[in-house]
Amino acid sequence: MLQIALVGISVILLAIIFKNYKSEYSIYISLAGCILIFYLGLSKLELIISTIKKIQTYINLNESYLGILIKIIGITYIAEFTADLCKDFGHTAVANQIELVGKLTILATGMPILLALLDTINKFLTT
């Protein structure tokens, strides 16, 4: 985490310095910094996936649920990343729409898990 924090601070300082000379360069520096931080953060995603797979060995989980969870994590990151960039550039209305569509996409993607949960509850109630 310290490495990511240092990269973030460095990117912000560079963007502030370049904003005084060429404002468009600060946008590119911010975008490049975001991509670098995303790349550095992928190791955390690998840890999450390996932990979920370990949990899957302890209990019987449908493998499609793991795929759905990974998709939801990806949708969340992409929506938040894009919305934050829009907010940074002063386009709050676009950012709000991206967040809304991201939430709706997460809801739609997670429907199979919700249906399985309701099916399980129904089985408990009928027996």
Image: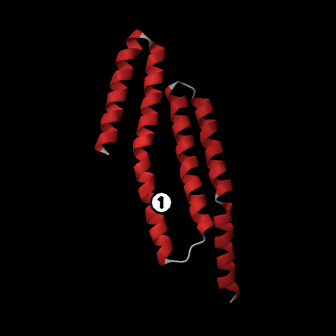
Q: Residue 90: horizontal and vertical position, in percent?
A: 53, 24
Is 87 rendered above or below residue 1? above
127 displayed left or right of 88: right
Total number of numbered labels?
1
Is 102 rendered above or below residue 20? below
Looking at numbered disc 1 in the image, what kind of residue is underneath it? Answer: Ile
Q: Residue 87: horizontal and vertical position, in percent?
A: 52, 30
Q: Crowdedness of circle 1 by 10 Å Cα count: few (<14), some, many (20+)? A: some
55 displayed left or right of 100: left
Q: Residue 122: horizontal and vertical position, in percent?
A: 69, 79
Disc 1 element: helix
Residue named by callout 1: 49
10 or 125, nearer to the observer: 10
Residue visible at 34% across and 34% down in the picture: 7
Residue visible at 55% across and 77% down in the picture: 60
Q: Residue 86's image quarter?
A: top right
Q: Residue 27: horizontal and vertical position, in percent?
A: 47, 22
75 or 51, nearer to the observer: 51
